[in-house]
Image: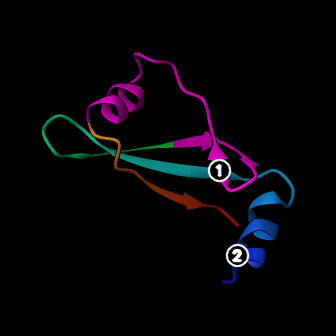
Amino acid sequence: MTPEEIRAFLGHGTRTAKLATSGPDGQPHVMPVWFALDGEDLMFTTWGESAKGRNLRRDSRAAVVVDE
């Protein structure tokens, strides 16, 4: 997809995403998130003490899959 196609896809309607982070033992932790596109940034919120919040503070690497 071109950058324009990506922005159009992410900005169209209400979509959910799956956010994958890495737990302390290296196991994947995948949770659904609502998101919004803010310019080039994909924005979502989470509680600071949630598993994904703790995982992201420890290791900022993550993967996101957006549902069609």
Coordinates of residue 52 in the picture (x, y in percent): 40, 32
Judged from the image, the secondary structure of the residue bearing numbered disc 1 is: strand
Q: Which residues are magenta?
A: 32-58
**Residue 38 included in the magenta stretch of the image:** yes
| Left or right: residue 11 compared with residue 35 | right
Residue shown at 36%/35% (left/top)?
56
Name the residue furthest left.
Answer: 25
Judged from the image, the secondary structure of the residue bearing numbered disc 2 is: helix
Query: Residue 25 or 2: which is nearer the viewer?
Result: 2
Report the Cα–Cα distance between label 1 and label 2: 12 Å
Coordinates of residue 20 in the picture (x, y in percent): 40, 49
The label number, if any, that marks residue 3 in the structure image: 2
| Left or right: residue 15 compared with residue 23 | right
64 over 5 or under it: above or below: above
Q: Quadrant of the C terminus?
A: bottom right
- Quadrant of residue 51 in the image? top left
